[in-house]
Image: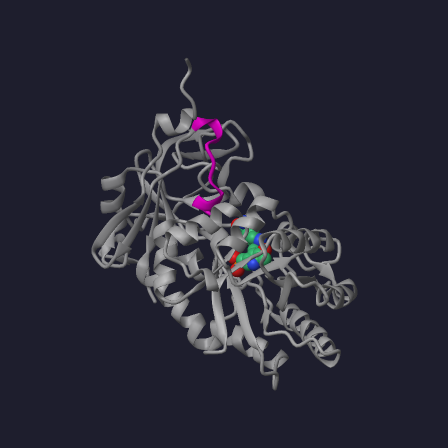
């Protein structure tokens, strides 16, 4: 699907030029394609088939309108906080399709999740398991749980987003999990539902995932042999996308890896996909403020910064930058930087960009972990978010104003 494409020299999102959107909402501004969000969800859910519940990982992009769109298509949700639970419920997500991951669930978050009757809490330590059991007993309920296991595989991704190595804070080591399941099975306030696992994000090679799923299967079969039959396997998320020249796995490749590792096993499956569903459905529009020549180095200073899109500063991540008006002339090699007072505030380093002051640019691949990781650093208002459907555009979150930024009234 050609979501973002040039038409007569102008960059379009679906049937509307991004320059029209930039004029309407000003910059910086996030723009998402409704058609691309739908297409990505359907591609994955069709490839994975009926036995697999696709749970959208809310952390990637938690805009309420985006969540509603996924809820309407039948998605479940993977949440990691009470705030994300509140968002999913407000967006109309079904509680019985919500799974709650994360290493540090507070007592309040656990109580709220149990009151909402969500599908499953993915437990990341023995201490958390017994906290959940105590709270559920106190509420007179049985808590539906899975243990998130740490399969100790190297996902071959950026160290900050690898989660399934034994030195990472996530999950419970396989052997400890085996013993913990048998202990948990005796607790009257715990209902053992499944096994969960997630090895990392932006996976481009799925072999480590296949290995992890094979280890999860072995645990499942071992527990079954001991009389503990679980209902589902939650195989995490992490499918990578193309930011630059990567060759990411297709939904069919992903389904094939899971099917191969689970061949012949009749058990329900869930996946927790974030980036692969939203990453390439969104862009961040920005305007060039100044060109600056420091003698040895040229800079293109734009009005978007690390507070709007943190990925380049945090991971050295690459995002393509396209002009909204195509220009045949060759670009000049520059650093594309924002107005924030940090040398780490860059969108791109040593990038050929054809830019002049006032020109509009699109930072591509910004639909996942873009707005979701934005902040008010340097007291900058967070940008608006806009959803496109065909020629229609709709504001789905307004730009923050000074009152939003101040946070309090002085007496
Ligand atoms: C437990 C869990 N589930 C799902 C995700 C979503 O990952 P991704 O956006 O890479 O699909 C993450 C993030 O890595 C995660 O930690
Ligand atoms: N924030 C990361 C992904 C984190 C995945 C969440 N566990 C990124 O932008 O690539």
Q: Is residue 378 above or below residue 33?
A: above
Q: Where the C terminus falls, by quadrant?
A: top left
Residue 242 visible to an observer of this rendering: no
- Does the magenta-highlighted stretch encompass residue 375? yes
Q: What is the span of residues highlighted in magenta in the rendered image? A: 369-379
Name the image quarter holding the N terminus. Answer: bottom left
Q: Is residue 336 above or below residue 387?
A: above
Residue 166, position as x, y percentages in the image: 75, 58
Determine the residue positioned at 57% across, 42% down. 314
Residue 84 percent coordinates (x, y):
48, 49
Residue 381 in which image quadrant: top left
Viewer-closest of 241 and 53? 53
Question: In the rendered image, is residue 216 in sight?
Answer: yes
Above or below residue 24? Residue 270 is below
Q: Name the residue rendered at 31%, 51% in the picture.
A: 328
Decide which of 183, 23 is in the foreground and name it. Answer: 183
Q: Say if the magenta span includes residue 9.
A: no
* Residue at 64% from the left image edge and 60% from the top image edge: 189
Residue 268: percent from left, percent from top = 55, 76
In the rendered structure, the answer to whether residue 99 lies left or right of residue 29 reads right
Q: Position of residue 193 (x, y in %)?
A: 61, 69
């Amino acid at each position: 699907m050609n979501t973002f494409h040039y038409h007569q020299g102008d960059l379009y999102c679906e049937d509307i030029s991004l320059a029209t959107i930039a004029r309407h909402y000003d910059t910086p501004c996030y723009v998402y394609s409704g058609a691309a969000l739908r297409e990505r969800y359907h591609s994955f859910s069709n490839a994975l088939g009926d036995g697999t519940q696709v749970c959208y990982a809310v952390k990637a992009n938690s805009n309420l309108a985006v969540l509603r769109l996924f809820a309407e298509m039948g998605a479940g949700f993977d949440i990691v906080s009470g705030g994300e639970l509140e968002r999913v419920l407000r967006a109309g997500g079904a509680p019985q399709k919500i799974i709650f991951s994360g290493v540090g669930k507070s007592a309040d978050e656990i109580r709220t999740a149990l009151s909402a009757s969500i599908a499953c809490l993915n437990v990341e330590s023995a201490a958390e398991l017994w906290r959940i059991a105590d709270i559920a007993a106190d509420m007179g309920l049985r808590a539906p749980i899975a243990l998130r296991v740490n399969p100790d595989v190297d996902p071959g991704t950026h160290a900050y987003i690898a989660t399934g190595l034994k030195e990472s804070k996530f999950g419970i080591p396989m052997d400890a999990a085996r013993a913990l399941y048998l202990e948990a099975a005796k607790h009257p306030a715990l209902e053992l539902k499944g096994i969960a696992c997630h090895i990392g994000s932006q996976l481009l090679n799925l072999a480590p995932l296949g290995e992890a799923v094979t280890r999860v299967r072995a645990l499942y079969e071992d527990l079954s042999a001991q009389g503990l039959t679980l209902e589902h396997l939650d195989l995490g998320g992490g499918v990578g996308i193309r930011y630059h020249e990567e060759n990411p796995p297709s939904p069919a490749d992903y389904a094939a890896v899971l099917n191969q590792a689970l061949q012949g096993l009749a058990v329900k499956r869930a996946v927790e996909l974030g980036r692969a569903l939203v990453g390439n459905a969104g862009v961040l529009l920005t305007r060039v403020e100044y060109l600056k020549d420091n003698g040895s180095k040229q800079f293109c200073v734009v009005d978007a910064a690390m507070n709007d899109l943190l990925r380049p500063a945090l991971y050295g991540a690459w995002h393509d930058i396209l002009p909204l008006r195509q220009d045949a002339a060759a670009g000049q090699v520059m650093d594309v930087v924002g107005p924030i007072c940090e040398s780490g505030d860059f969108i791109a380093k040593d990038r050929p960009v054809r830019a002049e002051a006032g020109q509009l640019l699109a930072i591509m691949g910004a639909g996942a972990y873009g707005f979701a990781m934005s902040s008010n650093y340097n007291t900058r208002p967070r940008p608006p978010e806009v959803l496109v459907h065909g020629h229609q555009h709709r504001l789905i979150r307004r730009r923050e104003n000074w009152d939003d930024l101040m946070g309090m009234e002085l007496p």
